[in-house]
Image (cartoon, rainbow, N blue to C red):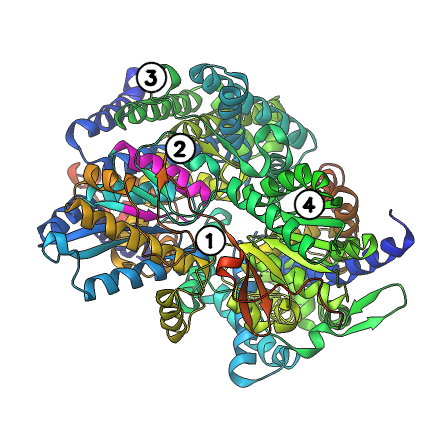
Amino acid sequence: MLSPVILIPAVLNGLLIGAVYALVALGLTLIYGVLHIINFAHGALLTAAMFAAFFVHRLLGLDPYLAAVLLTPLFFVFGYGLQRFIIAPAAHGEDRNILLVTLGLAVIIENGLLYAFRADTRTINLDYAFRVIDLGIVFLAVPRVVAFGVVIVVALILWFVMSRTDTGRAIRAVAKEKLGAELSGIDVAHIYAVTFGLGTACLAIAACLLIPTYYVNPQAGNAFVLIAFTIVVLGGMGSVAGALLGGLFVGVVESLSGLYLGESLGQLGIFVMFILVLLFRPNGLFGERI
Amino acid sequence: MTARLLLPLLLVVVALALVPAVVTSNVALNFMVTVLLIALVGQGWNVLGGYGGQYSFGHSAFFGTGAYVTAILQVRYGVNAWLGFALGIATGALVGAAIGAVSFRSGLRGSYFALVTLAFAEVLRILASVTPITGAGVGTLIKLDLRPEALQFQSRVPFYWIILALVAISLIVARVIEASRFGAWLVAVRENESAARALGVNATLMKVSAMTISAAITAAAGCFYAQYFLFVDSGIAFGPWISVEALLAPIIGGIGTVFGPLLGALVVKMLGELAKLVAGDAPGLDLVIYGCVLILVVAFAPRGVGGVFHEFYNFVSRAWTPAPTPMRRRDG
Amino acid sequence: MTKVRSGLDRRDFLQTSALGAFAAVTGIVAAPAVLRAQGASVKLGVLHPVSGALSYSGQQGRLGATIAIEEINAAGGIKALGGAKFEPMLGDAQSTPDGGNAEVEKMNAAGVSSIIGGYASSICLAASQTAARYDLPYLVDVGVADSIVTRGLKNTFRFGPGFGVIAKTALDNLVTINDQAGKPAKSVMIVHEDSLFGSGLAKLLNAQLPGRGFEVLETIAHPTPTRDFNNVVLKIKARDPDLVIPADYYNEYVLLARTMQQQRVRPKGIYSVLGGAASSYKFVKEFPEAAQYIMDCNHWFDPRNAKALALKKKVEDKGQFYTYEVFMNYSCVLLLADAIERAASADRAKIIAALESSTFAGHLMPYGPTKFVNGQNQGAAPVNTQVLGNDIQVIFPATFASAKPVFPMPRA
């Protein structure tokens, strides 16, 4: 039954959804690679961004893709502020405290949204959401193709920022050798906050790409967190290229294992792979770090 | 192990044992059972995370194993509940040893270790949600049978004794570890693994042993949960909620201390109740308050609530003992 | 110097937290006393998962229950108790069994006469069992697991249908609808979520459908949440079944239906069972095209019942959707009020006895007079609905039907 007729579309679908996973993972891997913290608030921040995209559409009538232009800088500032004025001062630089603070933030964001907007699942009905590109044997959903393109562009920009700009060099310096960077005059607290801001900005874009075909409720973002962690590990923690390739790879693996094992058991494939990579190639399949 | 070390422990347990005599309200009793349950899970995490320095995000793997083994043995194989309870703990320990051996032998530490435990817990959750023996998506319901032989009781009080006894044992275990050579080695590995290895400590063995003990304690909590609520499904047993509770209690209470998890569980659960009182019936608002207070606690008590007590105690004892220049000593 | 300052801060903090702890303890102990002090009223526990994963359903359930309570109070309360008002005690099960359990303990301590709600089977199982310790009447609003009423708990009653009845009705009605249309559907694919209701249903359908002239081509289980349904739809497309039977929660159902529309997959019929979205006004309003002609076998109000329609208007005027949680909980409160009226007492044992002998017919559901046997309402059964135009019509059984089924789906 697994003829090319079904295999090829499955692989293509996997690549398209994998791109969105990659974007969520990009935010996570940046934050991890530089701050060396596991950000428990990542899913909640994604949910918040999805709510923002939803309401920008509902209240201002702005198309989600245009909303990204507005929300990305906004969420950058939000992320910057969170790290600079809440996480860093509250955590006193202790890893375990950062865990708790991001956990606390996740609880606050998720339930604040629940309190403000109730638990209703919200969707946007856009006419292009149902448009497809007909490739003969497969229909590709237009929003997914758009998302794929945007993710590639975002990854390229991010890569450029990291490797070609002063801020990027400073981020890499802090990631590699915090003390040395500090001694050479880099404002570490500022760089930390910039990184957290970049990671949060990625989520804003991801939210705008997801909302045309997905839904939002106060729990919606959590569905993407575990898979994003998997990608971060596969790609090597802190690697931009790794997160992109890892995302695409996980998308295809998820798609194929879902096809062979069924959707429920198919999730198993991802975690087994995750464990194996951690055990045998803890630096990730795609090696290099930022 | 001296009596002096065990005395505070004994005092706390006796004080807790007096609770049912003083408090007749079942609300309070049920509240205390929940606190002790989380304290137990937290103590399990603390043995590995606190003393061993290995932060696990997947302690639900052990909690769930305990819960499922207890439930399945009774429901499907007619095994006596008490025996099932013991076997649940043993299986949990085995799972802990296995995951520990695989992870530590590969040299995983820090966030890598945290993530691998999370993945193992997820694998177990998915397996439990599809395999027939666990009841798959339907879950496993233990038959209501209110007899002490079936480890079910009409009153809440016997359950309170059981969970208190388990917590008492876990406190003793933590204290014994602290005072033992094993504990010293474990702390050495936590502080500086390569130095410990250079001194001839078998670090991997230390960590795997700690994980086994840790898993057994957490599995006991899972067994208790199954017996108390008589129902287990994959989300309850292996869901991330219990992994989070497991690390929350000891970190809030004071990581790597005997009473940290108990104190932390009490604080965390009280915060939850307090937030509910303040927030009223608005859905979510209580958890917003809870989250805010959590961050404030971390901000103002970075070494855990236990750390605050400790400092306070030091402050008071210094105030009582005349010292030449107490203020300067505090500064220094 | 900084250390001294922070030391003082910590002391302040300690005092504050000690005060807080004291307040919490006294709060727990004092709350019941305060509640008891209030005059002639009947306390009613209203338990739902209003936060956490099930919060939408929980909030809808709470809405239905509180509207009913307000209406009863406005109409003069419980007559047999001299017009005593219902005093609701709202509880949040936080979407977990232990959360539900803790709330039942509090409700019991506050002296509630009875409890309604629970919503999810796992919460109902734990909560009703705890209530049983205090012989506290527990009326399950939705929870469909059959085990809820087969444990021999005297205090536990379920107004709605259990899983076995739902599955059997769904199957019988499917066969009838297909027969009436001249048997256009022969092959079936089942798409279900992998927890209690979806898996249980899939198992039953797989056992029963072949004997009734259907071939089950494939059964696809998926977890909740599932992020992407493209693969599932691909499989449906490849096998090309006459009928797709989804059993999913709302969010996944919406994603599935939208993906099917997107991928241009149109079987002869979509027949869902307790399909989260198929009989949801929200879905019909937001995705009229994807929802069109979908059939569902679900909890539904009696469309000829004026009270049910009045409630629909009331809920919609509040800006909410009229979902099954609303009218099920509303009906449960009415049922309970009737029992208390007949018991002429807020005494728990008397309420249980009154529920046992209930013949209450003033509810919104097409169940007929209530009759509990071992806690299960015998008349409870789901009905079949279909999305036609911008509305949801009852198409089966004929006694309640407001429209004729359109099956197979007309090709666009």
Residue topped by disc 2: B229
Element at label 1: loop
Element at label 3: helix
For the residue pair A271 and A121, the one nearer the viewer reads as A121
The residue at the point 75 percent across, 71 percent down is A160
* Depicted C155 relative to depicted B286: above or below: above
Residue topped by disc 1: C54
- Span of residues in magenta: C115-133
Q: Are marks 4 and 1 in contact (CB under 8 Å)?
A: no
Element at label 4: helix
**Around disc 4, counting alpha carbons within 10 Å, would you say few (fewer than 14), some (14 to 19), or many (20 or more)?**
many
Tell me if residue B152 can be seen.
Answer: yes
Q: Is residue C118 magenta?
A: yes
Residue topped by disc 3: B148
Q: Are marks 2 and 4 in contact (CB under 8 Å)?
A: no
Q: CA distance from mark 2 to mark 4?
A: 29 Å
Residue C5 figure quarter: bottom left
Q: CA distance from mark 4 to mark 1?
A: 22 Å
- The numbered disc on residue A267 is 4
Task: Say how many tags the image has.
Answer: 4
Residue B144 screen position, x and y as percent? 39, 26
Q: Main secondary structure of the magenta part?
A: helix
Residue B139 screen position, x and y as percent? 53, 35
Give the chain letter at badge 3: B
- The numbered disc on residue C280 is none
Residue C319 screen position, x and y as percent? 41, 74
The residue at the point 33 percent across, 52 percent down is C332
For the residue pair C361 and C42, the one nearer the viewer reads as C361
